[in-house]
Image (cartoon, grey):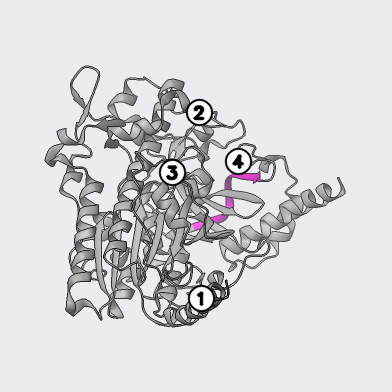
Amino acid sequence: MYTCVRACLLLLALHTLTSEARRKERKNVLFIVADDLRTSLGCYGDSVAKSPNIDQLASKSQVFFNAYAQQAVCAPSRTSMLTSRRPDTTRLYDFKSYWRVHSGNYTTMPQHFKSTGYFTMSVGKVFHPGIASNHTDDYPYSWSIPAYHPASFRFEKEKMCKGDDGKLHANLLCAVNVTEQPGGTLPDMESTDEAVRLLKSRAGDADSVDVPFFLAVGFHKPHIPFRIPQEYLSLYPIDQMTLAPDPDVPELLPPVAYNPWMDVRKRDDVQKLNISFPYGAIPKDFQLRIRQHYYAAVSYMDAQVGRLLGALDELGLADSTMVVFTSDHGWSLGEHGEWAKYSNFDVATRVPLIFYVPGVTSLTDWFGESTFPFIDVLTQSELSFQNGKVIKNMVELVDVFPTVSYMAGIRAPRPCPDVSLQEELCTEGENLAYTFRHKEKTPDAEAVSFSQYPRPADTPQVDSDLPDLKDIKVMGYSLRTWDYRYTLWLGFNPKTFQVNVSDVHAGELYMLADDPGQDKNIYSGLDHSVMMRKMAGLPHTLSLQTRMNLQLLYLTAGMKTSRTKA
């Protein structure tokens, strides 16, 4: 017994010493980003999801429970996260411009690592491909070698889904026999293979020992179409699937806030349903199948994450590599009568954000046990894990760049000045390193996430989900606090990039304690006179985020008083 106690104390002392040393040394970084992944994971409390590999990662990590994207669509969100600048700074609201030309020559997270001596690599969808990343994934600025994209991705938008008629279609629901697919593979499988190959090359190259790496791996799923291995559907029997708890369009939802999910409507199998635009409901049996396929896509993606982490472990890199897992934004699964992303609701903006920092979020393993043994979700889906440390205060994807930098052991970018269009390296987010050192005790009322979404009109249009810059007329800005989601839809000039704070097209306010699903908009039922009177005296130079924070404070002050008296 005495020997055991001494051994434990020795291990604790060694852990303390090595933890201090690890904080000072530069770590490798494995940065994993999923596409369209909401918090439908076991580690985020989703009882339906089967995600044992990501849950295992979370058990040895710090989990940010309330992390939010800055715009719920791929290119703007990824550019914002990777530059740590908000969409109003990158001026990217669609897919059709490259920030270095369109806005400013902003340094990216991988570029920052590269400039400090890291070997940086990109696999799969990290930046949004195409114009938004200069058709090069921002190479050579961000990457030491050209970015890798799986060859099989070119089939994603082609007719690859076998229908009931025996013919191939461009369907939304597209579970396939992988052996019958071109090359006998799928994009995320190819990306995992390439990422593992790169890890092996770094681990096996003697010349690379003193050169840390930054490897970013972007998985395409659960983005539509749900072209996934058919066996993953078996994890989610259709008779056990349920509809969204709030499948109807809320009565007081402003028309400008509704996204008509055009990319879903365009798929062959959805077109056959002949759903009226914009508010027609998808038949309930098809809704269940969409939800089944989404969750199956999550489990398929989880398996690829498991393969990647298993390789990291087997190569002896888990003790020297920080792992970050996140997503570009969420995805509505029928909530509010909506599908896809393209909104400011939690289901579209909230994302997983998980940090594994060896020696900081987990003890060093002195007994040679595996850190991330691969878990086959098809045979071990019932495995469960308890999260490591959980942070529940609001954080944002613009916080990722400075936090990853600091926790990896390099200089974090400093905060941006109020006007930062000419600043190449700075952050509009917050360095969250302090959260790894201190226990979260109480809700932080000042912790706020800020998201936005553009619209071409006050009513749903065929381009409402993704308007071109020149067609944007209204911008919806949204605050998420512990107690509220507050959204204002304001007039926007796409030529000057200016928002008119006095041109209010609509508003939304949801009390989350009574309405966690954000279905009961109480904005129009409140007395705005006090708020308007107090706001009138504020300087015009006040930032929009500060202005909306004050508005929310004034609007809800009376509500808090009445609730306290009750």
Circle 3 or circle 2, nearest the eye? 2
Q: Which residues are magenta?
A: 499-512
Circle 2 or circle 1, nearest the eye? 1
Circle 1 or circle 3, nearest the eye? 1
- Name the residue beneath numbered marker 2: 243
Residue lying at the far top of the rendered structure? 165
Q: Main secondary structure of the magenta part?
A: strand
- Name the residue beneath numbered marker 3: 342
Task: Determine the CA span between mark 2 and mark 1.
Answer: 53 Å
Query: What is the secondary structure assignment of the residue under circle 2?
Result: loop
Residue 211 lies left or right of residue 292; in this view the side is: left
Residue 14's place in the image compared with 228, above or below, is: below
Mark 2 or mark 1, earlier in chain: 1
Q: Amino acid at mark 4?
A: Gln
Query: What is the secondary structure assignment of the residue under circle 3?
Result: loop
Mark 3 or mark 2, earlier in chain: 2
The location of residue 422, given as percent across then percent down, is 39, 75
Task: Determine the CA span between mark 4 and mark 1.
Answer: 52 Å
Would you say residue 185 is visible in this rendering? yes
Query: What is the secondary structure assignment of the residue under circle 1?
Result: helix
- Name the residue beneath numbered marker 1: 7
Q: Amino acid at mark 2?
A: Leu
Mark 3 neighbour class, 10 Å CA radius: few under 14, some 14 to 19, many 20 or more: many
Mark 4 or mark 1, earlier in chain: 1
Circle 4 or circle 3, nearest the eye? 4
